[in-house]
Image (spheres, rainbow, N blue to C red):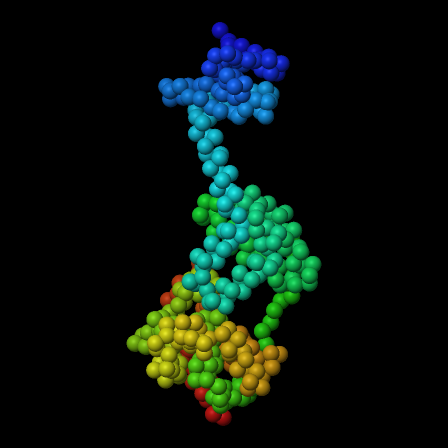
C-alpha cells in the first residue's frame, strides 16, 4: 500500500496549537511539523538508515515554507534511494561551505607563497606577493577558490591589461595557474581554471635581454669586469657570471652547500623548472670561488648581501655593477651573459647545440621525445665549459 504524501496545508500548520508538551503533524514520507507548547513549529523528517531510526531537521516554520520543506524531504528520499545517509550528506555540505569560506583565493595564494618561498629568492617572493596584493587580491581575494570561474580571473587580468602593462597581466596569469594547481593538489579546488584563458590576453611583446656577443666587445667587457672597484662579493659575482652563464637569480642565490670542489660541480634546483641541474666548474670558476670562500663561508650564500649574511646580494647588484662600468641597459644585462655564451659556443667554438641548451638549464628533448636527465653528456659538457673559460681568457689577453 502506497503511503500518502503531502497531507498538510499551510493553513492547518498556522492554526495548529497544542496544550501538550509536543504535537506532530505528519505530511507523509517521514516529513512532519513538531509543534511545541510555546507555539514554535519545526520541520523534521524521520527515516531509517542502516537499521537505525534517524531524524533530519529542516528549520522552523514559517521561515521554511511547506513547499521548501517538501523539496528538502524529496531530496533526502532520493539520497536514501541511492544508499546515502542524508544527515551525513548534510554535514558534509556544511563542512564544504565552511571550508570554502575559509579557502579564499587570497588565503590559498599566501599559503602557496609560503610553500614555495624556500625555492625562490627573497626578492622574487616579495615581488610576487606585491603583484598579487596590488592586482588580484582587491578583486578576487575574498572569493572561495573552489567557486571561482575562468571569467572571474579574466576580468581581474583584463583590468591589468587595460593599464597597458600586458607583461604583468601574463605574469599574473602564470602565478594564478601555480596557485590553482597548488589548490588542486591540496584538495581545495577542482581544477586549474587559468588553462581556459589561453589566448585570452593580448600578446606580450617578446623581451630580449641586451647582450654583447661580438668577441672583441666581449673581451672589452671582461677586462672591464676584472678592473671593477666595487666590493669583492659583487666583483666575484660579476666574474663568475660569464663563466657559468646561469640565470641571474641562480647566481645570486648560489649556496656553498651546493658547491663540490672535489668533483668540480655546482648542483642546484632550478627555480623555473624545479629540476636539479649540474654546472661543471672550470678551473677559473673554482679559483674565484676559493678566493672568495674565506670572506663569505660563514654565510650559506656564496654571494651574501651587504646588509647581512642571511640574505644573498640584491638581484640588481650585478646590473648596477655593469652600469658602473659604463655598460648601459641597452648594451648589456646580467641575463645577457647567457646569450653571449649561447652565441659564441655555437657560432665560434662549434659545440653541440643540445649541450649548450642543456647547460643553459633549458629542457632538451632527445630523438624519442624524452627530456635528457641532468647527467646527460656530462663529460662532454665539462670539456665545453673548460674550453669556454679558456676561450674567454684568450680573447681577454689579446
Between 343 and 274, the residue placed more toward the observer is: 274
Between 21 and 62, the residue placed more toward the observer is: 21
In which quarter of the view is residue 286 placed?
bottom left
The residue under the point 58% across, 73% down is 209
Question: Most extreme residue toward the bottom, as rendered?
Answer: 398
Q: Is residue 377 visible?
A: no
- 323 versus 4 height, above or below: below
The residue under the point 54% across, 24% down is 60
**Horizontal arrangement in the rendering, residue 138 relative to residue 86 (left or right):** right
The residue under the point 47% across, 30% down is 90
| Image location (x, y in percent) of residue 212 | 56, 81
**Horizontal arrangement in the rendering, residue 266 relative to residue 81 (left or right):** left
| Image location (x, y in percent) of residue 177 | 54, 53
| Image location (x, y in percent) of residue 63 | 59, 25
Q: Is residue 25 visible?
A: yes
The residue under the point 54% across, 21% down is 40
In which quarter of the view is residue 210 placed?
bottom right
Question: Across the whole image, how many numbered discs are drawn on residues?
Answer: 0
Question: Most extreme residue toward the left, as rendered?
Answer: 262
Between 340 and 15, the residue placed more toward the observer is: 15
| Image location (x, y in percent) of residue 114 | 45, 58
Between 272 and 237, the residue placed more toward the observer is: 237
- 75 versus 346 height, above or below: above
Amino acid at each position: 500500500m502506497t503511503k500518502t504524501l503531502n497531507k498538510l496545508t499551510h493553513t492547518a500548520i498556522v492554526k495548529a496549537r497544542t496544550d501538550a508538551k509536543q504535537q506532530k503533524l505528519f505530511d507523509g514520507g517521514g516529513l512532519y511539523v513538531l509543534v511545541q507548547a510555546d507555539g514554535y513549529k519545526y520541520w523534521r523528517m524521520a527515516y531509517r538508515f542502516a537499521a537505525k531510526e534517524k531524524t533530519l531537521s529542516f528549520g522552523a516554520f514559517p521561515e521554511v515554507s511547506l513547499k521548501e520543506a517538501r523539496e528538502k524531504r524529496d531530496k533526502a528520499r532520493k539520497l536514501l534511494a541511492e544508499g546515502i545517509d542524508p544527515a551525513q550528506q548534510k554535514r558534509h555540505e556544511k563542512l564544504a561551505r565552511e571550508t570554502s569560506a575559509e579557502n579564499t583565493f587570497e588565503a590559498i595564494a599566501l599559503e602557496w607563497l609560503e610553500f614555495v618561498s624556500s625555492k625562490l629568492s627573497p626578492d622574487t617572493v616579495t615581488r610576487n606577493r606585491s603583484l598579487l596584493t596590488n592586482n588580484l587580491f582587491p578583486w578576487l581575494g575574498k572569493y572561495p577558490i573552489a567557486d571561482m570561474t575562468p571569467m572571474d580571473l579574466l576580468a581581474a587580468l583584463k583590468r591589468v591589461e587595460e593599464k597597458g602593462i600586458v607583461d604583468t597581466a601574463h605574469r599574473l596569469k602564470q602565478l594564478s595557474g601555480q596557485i590553482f594547481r597548488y589548490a588542486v593538489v591540496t584538495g581545495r579546488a577542482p581544477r586549474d581554471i587559468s588553462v581556459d584563458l589561453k589566448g585570452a590576453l593580448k600578446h606580450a611583446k617578446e623581451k630580449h635581454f641586451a647582450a654583447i656577443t661580438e668577441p672583441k666587445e666581449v673581451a672589452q667587457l671582461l677586462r672591464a669586469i676584472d678592473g671593477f672597484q666595487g666590493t669583492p662579493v659583487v666583483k666575484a659575482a660579476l666574474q663568475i657570471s660569464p663563466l657559468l652563464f646561469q640565470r641571474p637569480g641562480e647566481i645570486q642565490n648560489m649556496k656553498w652547500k651546493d658547491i663540490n670542489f672535489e668533483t668540480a660541480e655546482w648542483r642546484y634546483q632550478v627555480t623555473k623548472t624545479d629540476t636539479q641541474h649540474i654546472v661543471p666548474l672550470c678551473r677559473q670558476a673554482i679559483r674565484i670561488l676559493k678566493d672568495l670562500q674565506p670572506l663569505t663561508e660563514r654565510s650559506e650564500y656564496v654571494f651574501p648581501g651587504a646588509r647581512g649574511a642571511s640574505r644573498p646580494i640584491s638581484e640588481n647588484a650585478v646590473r648596477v655593477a655593469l652600469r658602473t662600468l659604463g655598460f648601459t641597459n641597452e648594451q648589456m644585462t646580467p641575463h645577457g651573459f647567457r646569450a653571449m655564451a649561447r652565441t659564441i659556443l655555437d657560432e665560434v667554438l662549434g659545440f653541440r647545440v643540445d649541450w649548450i641548451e642543456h647547460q643553459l638549464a633549458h629542457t632538451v628533448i632527445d630523438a624519442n621525445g624524452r627530456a635528457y636527465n641532468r647527467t646527460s653528456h656530462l663529460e662532454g659538457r665539462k670539456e665545453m665549459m673548460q674550453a669556454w673559460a679558456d676561450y674567454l681568457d684568450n680573447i681577454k689577453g689579446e
